[in-house]
Image (cartoon, rainbow, N blue to C red):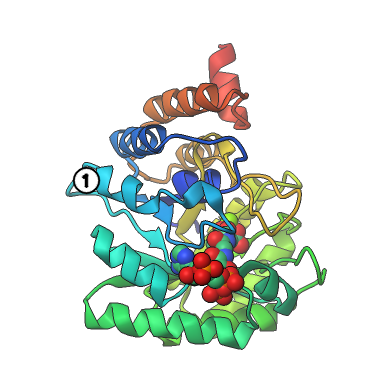
Amino acid sequence: TLPSKVRLVEVGPRDGLQNEKQVISTEIKVELIHRLASAGLRTIEATAFVSPKWVPQMADAAAVFSAIQPLPTVTYPVLTPNRQGFDAAMAAGAKEVSVFSAASETFSRKNTHCSMSESLERCRSVAEAAKAEHIKVRGYVSCVLGCPYEGEITPLAVAEVARALFDMGCYEVSLGDTIGTGTPEKTKAMLEAVARWVPLKKLAGHFHDTWGMAIANVYASLQTGVSVFDSSVAGLGGCPYAPGALGNVATEDVVWLLQGCGIECDVSLEALVNTAEWISRELGREPSSRVTRALRAR
Ligand code: HMG
Ligand code: MG
């Protein structure tokens, strides 16, 4: 049976925008966050405290975070790859952070300039500092269904990294199909392997739509018992270290799926679609969400 309620983690302002080549003003980023909160999203990943040399679009992380007018019902986690990022996030007033590692050695080196085990050490160092300050930490694993450099990744490799993140104190581990090559049966096999060590209730699905499989993989994950999903308004996004990768599954498409399954998620589809159309106009492109396009054509 499917879960009766799902929590959505909106990653549009971070994963969605991080790879945009055009300069996006701080004001637009902040307005996007505010509109998403108004649409009912209760977890909004706001920005990333990463090296501006490698991800220039996130260079205004502190300015974005400080300009948010937070709603008491919403959490605004930020990505922090190391202690330097964590300290900057704390100085900006962040209350929740996310650390990230990968199930592929080569991807780890490209994305974070260190091995998988060094990357986990960095995560641990952030997790320890966070614990001391009573800050919640979420963990990401990249390349859970394939790597842009190494190809196939075994479910066991994913499970080992997920377990390490969970054991160091991450309250939830988000499993990222960074390049979107996963298919539903592969998704289920991977989830079952991870769930041997990390409870299903502590896992989130993070699907990129490069191969058009993201919504199918969300459904396969729901069937397996996952009840938290990362998604991106208008299907924005891509990873700078996964060439050609498209955006996350569109939040509108996930909401439509959930509504169709009778699963609660507390998001207003109408407000979300308006936000998708607004940000797409600001970026000068069509929303990649099929639901947004279909509703507009009505
Ligand atoms: P490093 O290993 O210290 O070394 O950085 P470096 O050579 O990359 O850079 C060193 C310089 O970076 C120094 O400055 C540091 O001060 C600075 P310099 O002396 O050269 O002027 N630096 C920082 N600056 C700001 N914030 C920091 C920070 N740390 C060092 N936190 C690091 C390692 C990971 C920080 C760097 O490689 C980096 O920022 N990489 C970008 C990683 C990234 O943002 N990737 C995209 C997000 S992950 C993702 O999208 C996947 C996910 O969505 C799930 C999925 O889909 O799979 C989560
Ligand atoms: Mg991602």
Which one is in front, 254 or 285?
A: 285
| Relative to 182, 80 lies left or right | left
Residue beneath the point at 28% across and 54% down:
75
Q: Is residue 98 left or right of residue 112?
A: left
Tell me if residue 68 comes above or below residue 49 in the rendering. above
The residue sitting at 42% across, 52% down in the picture is 47
* Spot occupied by residue 33 in the image (x, y as percentages of width and height): 35, 40
Ligand 1's quadrant is bottom right
Q: Position of residue 225 (x, y in %)?
A: 50, 64
Residue visible at 40% across and 68% down?
Answer: 85
Q: Quadrant of residue 159?
A: bottom right
The residue type indicated by label 1 comes to Pro
> In the displayed structure, does residue 101 sit left or right of residue 270?
right
Residue located at (27% from left, 66% from top): 90
Task: Indicate the quadrant containing the C terminus: top left, top right, bottom left or bottom right.
Answer: top right
Q: Which residue is mark 1?
A: 70
Q: Which image quadrant for residue 283? A: top right
Q: Residue 180 versus residue 48: which sits nearer the camera?
A: 48
Q: Relative to the observer, which residue lies in front, 196 or 110?
A: 110
Vertical arrangement, residue 223 with respect to residue 257, above or below: below
Q: Is mark 1 within 8 Å of ligand 1?
A: no
Along the viewing direction, whichever of 83 and 183 lies nearer the viewer: 83
- SS of the residue under disc 1: loop
| Furthest residue toward front | 53
Res 4 visible:
no
Count neighbours of disc 1 (C-alpha within 10 A) and say few if under 14, some if 14 to 19, many if 20 or more: some
| Rendering coords of residue 198 (x, y %) | 49, 81
Give left or right: position of 253 versus 97. right
